[in-house]
Amino acid sequence: MTVRVRVIPCLDVANGRVVKGVNFVDLADAGDPVEQARLYDAAGADELCFLDITASHEGRGTILDVVARTASVCFMPLTVGGGVRSVEDARALLLAGADKVAVNSAAVARPALVGDMAERFGAQCVVGAIDARQVAPGRWEIFTHGGRKPTGIDAVAHAQDLAARGAGELLVTSMDRDGTRDGYDLALTRAISDAVPVPVIASGGVGHLDHLVDGVVEGHASAVLAASIFHFGQHSVAEAHAALARAGLPVRH
Amino acid sequence: MLALIDYGAGNLRSVENALRAAGASDVEVTADPDTVRRADRIVLPGVGAFGAAMNALAGLDGMVDALNERVVTQAAPFLGICVGMQLMANAGEEMGIYPGLGWIGGTVRLMPDRPGLKVPHMGWNDVTPTVGHPMLVPGEAYFLHSYAFDVDDPAERLAETDHGGTVTAAVGRANMLGVQFHPEKSQAYGLALLARFLEWRP
């Protein structure tokens, strides 16, 4: 076989607590990201993603403790994003135990940050996160501030720029689809995936398992990220793997 | 005592955590050549670029000499992980050409640029042993790399995987083992490999 399609559950974390995650009664502390990470580790998730949505500056250090505690009990790849503004921010996360660091708004404001991070830590741990909205048929733009603020930057061109600067992977989120459960924006995912040499993670809009398959088959993504279909027990990681396997895609056993 | 070499590699803590979870009770994270000389086993982790990693390792005064003495001359069991494995090569071609430790004949080169082939090679893939080796069993492990080890002597290429063609997954000879994948990120498969390393008597 060849490299497997990765299924990546994503947990939103604020001030060190899960704000969007599994609501399982048997967890000792359902708000603890480490408890949830252990569940996904045991469930066979291929990677895990923490998105730190802490609003206050004072709360920002909490993610480091969460990452360190997770890395001491979970032996799976961990990507951490949200609020990364500098090489020092990335370094702190990597030293805490993150394997990859995702950079989003800061790389829109200053794309050179991606190159600085890749030079310092290697391209393999730099994830370029891209939030895009469709502005015309076949054209997408980068939006910041949770998808509210247009930048006028073409999403495909931005993706190519980040990859050329050293991002080893791109996390592509459709802000049109995020939270809708209508499925990924497949045209966006495909347009970027076909335009860059690095792997693309499809994100935003998964409502059922077929959407994961579509993300790979039609969107040409290497990995599929989802939140709510896993957190609320609608589907397990094993079911996601089985759906991908039924479509003839390579998955982990 | 197991010496885990600290030369600034970002995955140091993950490797330490995994070694402890695999049963290692006496791990010393060290940048000290004398500690390496006293070690029963040695693990060299690594992420990032070959040249930067080799410079960082060589920048620890006396470390390369201590590794040569303890691993090559005295045959202490050694495990290199990812870039730590690649450093066992004669040379690496990432961002310039740099000499490696020269323990395993071969060169570390950029993976081929082919349409539709994604580089870095990132994710879970097969580990297929090519020769019988007590440390290596078939399974799935997590890979994350853009450069791959072209091994001169097929007998020193211990396992392979597939990413647009066969790619070296493990190298070694005698008391030395290097794995391109990340056992510390490969859940049960990886922890089992580390547990075998702790018991390995080559």
Image (cartoon, rainbow, N blue to C red):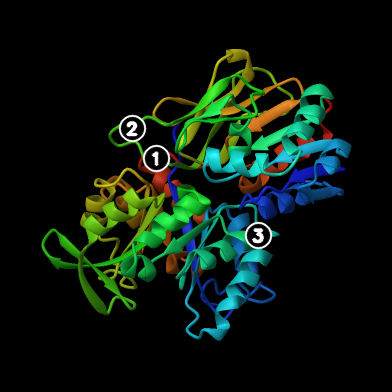
Q: Which callout, 2 or 1, points at the residue further toward the start of the chain?
A: 2
Q: Residue at x 47, y 77 (%)?
A: A53
Res. B51 in view: yes
Instruction: Tell me: B38 left or right of A202.
Output: right
Q: Share a chain, discs 3 and 1?
A: no
Is label 3 in contact with label 1 (beta carbons under 8 Å)? Answer: no
Q: Residue at x 54, y 38 (%)?
A: B50
Mark 3: amino acid: Ala
Q: Residue at x 60, y 41 (%)?
A: B55
Measure the C-alpha gap from mark 2 to mark 3: 33 Å
Report the mark closest to the observer, 2 or 3: 2
Badge 1: chain ID:
B
User: Badge 3 is on which residue?
Assistant: A71
User: Badge 2 is on which residue?
Assistant: B113
Mark 2: amino acid: Asp
In front of the other: A127 or B165: A127
Measure the C-alpha gap from mark 3 to mark 1: 26 Å
Query: Pointer 1: residues within 10 angstroms few (<14), some, or many (20+)?
Result: many
Mark 1: amino acid: Val
User: Badge 1 is on which residue?
Assistant: B119
